[in-house]
Amino acid sequence: MTIDSNTSLNELLNHAVGALKELNNDDGEFVLKDLFRGFEWNRITKGDRTKLGSMFLSYSRNENTAIIEPTEKTPQNQQKYKTRGK
């Protein structure tokens, strides 16, 4: 999938959820941005990044509690997550 400024929020969320499969329990904490390649993340508008962050937080709390859990926020106000033991 090619990510650009026209990529829908649902497609972006699906991309992030798919990237979760590549994480290991020993990867430690991560932020949503880590699930995208640098140039992909930069192609997403700031407003869409904020909305995507809210959607991913909701996903982690409601739909995917067995794999990841939210932790604290970074000084830049980004939500941190960690993988749960399998």
Image (spheres, rainbow, N blue to C red):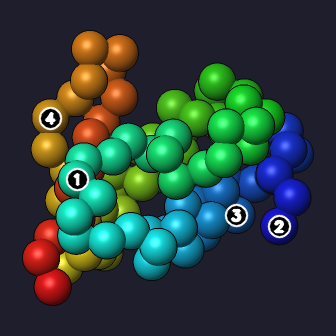
Disc number lying in front (1 or 3)? 1
Task: Give the x, y percent position of residue 85.
Answer: 12, 76
Q: What element carries label 3?
A: helix
Q: Is mark 4 on a helix, strand or loop?
A: strand
Q: What element carries label 2?
A: loop
CA gap, disc 1 to disc 3? 25 Å
- Mark 2 crowd level (few <14, some 14–19, many ≥20, 10 Å Cα): few
Q: Which of marks 4 and 2 is nearer the N terminus?
A: 2
Q: Which of marks 1 and 3 is nearer the N terminus?
A: 3
Disc number lying in front (2 or 1)? 1
The answer to which of 10 and 19 lies nearer the viewer is 19
**Which residue is painted at 74% across and 43% down in the image?**
40
CA gap, disc 4 to disc 2? 30 Å
Disc number lying in front (1 or 4)? 1
The residue type indicated by label 3 comes to Glu
Q: Is mark 1 on a helix, strand or loop?
A: loop
* Residue picked out by circle 4: 72
Query: Split into 4 quadrants, where in the image is the N terminus?
Result: bottom right
Q: Is residue 62 visible?
A: no
* Residue picked out by circle 2: 1
**Which residue is painted at 85% across and 44% down in the image?**
4
Disc number lying in front (3 or 4)? 4
- Mark 3 crowd level (few <14, some 14–19, many ≥20, 10 Å Cα): few
Is there a contact, CB below 8 Å, between mark 3 and mark 4? no
* Residue picked out by circle 3: 11
Identify the mark at residue 28; answer none if there is no mark: 1
The residue type indicated by label 4 comes to Glu
CA gap, disc 2 to disc 3? 9 Å
Is there a contact, CB below 8 Å, between mark 2 and mark 3? yes
The residue type indicated by label 1 comes to Gly
Disc number lying in front (2 or 3)? 2
Task: Give the x, y percent position of residue 50.
Answer: 52, 32
